[in-house]
Amino acid sequence: MFLNQLKDFLIKNKVKKRLSNVTPDFNSNPIKTVGIIFDETHFEKKVAILNELLKKGIPLEKISVLIFNTIAKKNQAFEHPTFSPNDFTLGANFKNPDVNEFISKKFDLLINYYNIEKAPLLQVSNLSKASFKVGFSAVDKRINHFMINTTTDNYKVFIDELFKYLKILNKI
C-alpha cells in the first residue's frame, strides 16, 4: 500500500517536471494512424468507440489501443495491450514492453479517453510521440493539444466533436 502511494507520488512528480517544459508543436499533417488510451475502470465502451472511428473512415489496422487497468490479475488474457500501476518502477519507468512500444509509435492522433487524472495515464500520455493529442477538458491542459468538454459516457458526442474540429483544422 505505502509502496504504491510512493510510486504514484514519484510518477506524478516526473510528469509535472516534464509538463513544465512542454512547448506546443502543431503540424497540419492529415490523420492516418490513431492511438487510444482507455481507463478501463471508468469506461467499458471500447468497441463502440472503435466502431465510431471506423464509421469516420479510420481503418481498424491503423488504430492502436492501450488500456489502463488498476487491478492487474496474473495470467488474465486481454483483447488489447494492458498496463497497470505494477508495470512502473519507482523511477516512473515502464516494465511492460507493450507500453514502451505504444509510446514509441509516432501516431498522427492520440485520443486520451479518460477524465480522471491518474499518474500512470498521465505518464503514458505525456511520453507518447503522437503529433496531435486529444482528450477531455477535465484533465491537465498541458497533456493535450485539443480538449473536448464532455463526459466519458458521451462517446458519440466526443467523436463527433473531434471529427468536426479535425475537419476545421484540415487534419482529415
Image (spheres, rainbow, N blue to C red):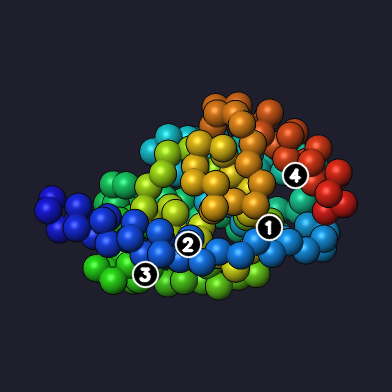
**Circles 2 and 3 in contact, beta carbons < 8 Å:** no
Q: Nearer the viewer, mark 3 or mark 4?
A: 3
User: Which label belongs to residue 91?
Assistant: none
The numbered mark, 1 or 3, whose residue comes first in the sequence reads: 3
Label 1: which residue?
132
Q: Residues within 10 Å of mark 1 (few under 14, many from 20)?
A: many
Q: Nearer the viewer, mark 1 or mark 3?
A: 1
**85 shown above or below 50:** below
Residue that lies at the very extreme toward the left in this rendered image: 2
At mark 1, the secondary structure is: loop
At mark 2, the secondary structure is: helix
Q: Nearer the viewer, mark 2 or mark 3?
A: 2
Q: Nearer the viewer, mark 1 or mark 4?
A: 1
Label 2: which residue?
20
Q: Residue flagged by tag 4: what amino acid is it?
A: Leu
In space, the residues marked 1 and 4 are separated at their CA atoms by: 19 Å
Q: Is residue 106 left or right of residue 13?
A: right
In space, the residues marked 1 and 3 are separated at their CA atoms by: 23 Å
At mark 3, the secondary structure is: loop
At mark 4, the secondary structure is: helix
User: Which label belongs to residue 54?
Assistant: 4
> How far from the left and from the top, in percent, is residue 157?
68, 28
In space, the residues marked 2 and 1 are separated at their CA atoms by: 18 Å
> How far from the left and from the top, in percent, is residue 18?
45, 66
Q: Is residue 39 left or right of residue 95?
A: right
Front-most of residues 113 and 11:
11
In space, the residues marked 2 and 3 are separated at their CA atoms by: 21 Å
Q: Residues within 10 Å of mark 3 (few under 14, many from 20)?
A: some
The numbered mark, 2 or 1, whose residue comes first in the sequence reads: 2
In space, the residues marked 4 and 2 are separated at their CA atoms by: 36 Å
Label 3: which residue?
94
Q: Residue flagged by tag 3: what amino acid is it?
A: Phe
